[in-house]
Amino acid sequence: MADDDVDFAVAAYRDQGVWQVAELKTAVTQDVGELVEALRRFPSDVGVLGMVAVDEEFFVLVRVSGPYTRFMLSDVTAVADYDLAADVADQLDLPDPAPDADADPAGDLEIVSDLGLSSSALDLLCDPDAYPDEMLLEIAERLGFGDELNALVG
């Protein structure tokens, strides 16, 4: 995946109870391990949330908290065309999607449930007809850092 396929990559984290959002270099999205390591550098009260919007097609959420890493992919069909999606699918031990698979989310839909966005609400936000940046902005809004994300990438 080329760097220019990435619409944006950010880290969102709460430091002393206040949400912060920092832009990540798109080069870290070339490898899931590098992305996770980049996220580990941020302090956080609740774990660091990585948000990557790719090519107006799909997004990835990665949450790093201590030794634990959780992944969520907005559209499992992206695995066929994007290395980042395939890497996330490998982390999740997902089988390759069937050629006629629906554009459903995959992975840990509970990834932000403790922050106030339930798995069912997150599932509903993963609309295959919506742009990933719009979906991520809505997620950020519901989690309490929509203005910060919009100021950075909007």
Image (cartoon, rainbow, N blue to C red):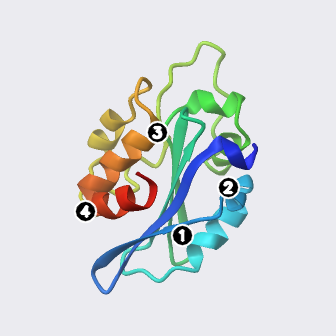
* 108 displayed left or right of 25: left
Callout 2–callout 1 Cβ contact below 8 Å: no
Label 1: element kind: strand
For label 2, the crowd category at 10 Å Cα-Cα, with few meaning under 14, some 14 to 19 and many 20 or more, is many
Say which residue label 2 marks: 29
Q: CA distance from mark 2 to mark 1?
A: 19 Å
Earlier along the polypeptide chain: callout 1 or callout 3? 1
Q: Residue at x 25, y 62 (%)?
A: 144
Say which residue label 3 marks: 132
Q: Mark 2 belongs to which amino acid? A: Thr
Examine the rendering and report whether any part of residue 145 can be seen: yes
Q: CA distance from mark 3 to mark 4?
A: 18 Å
Depth check, front residue: 59 or 123: 59
Q: CA distance from mark 2 to mark 3?
A: 15 Å
* 141 displayed left or right of 21: left
Q: Residue at x 34, y 64 (%)?
A: 148
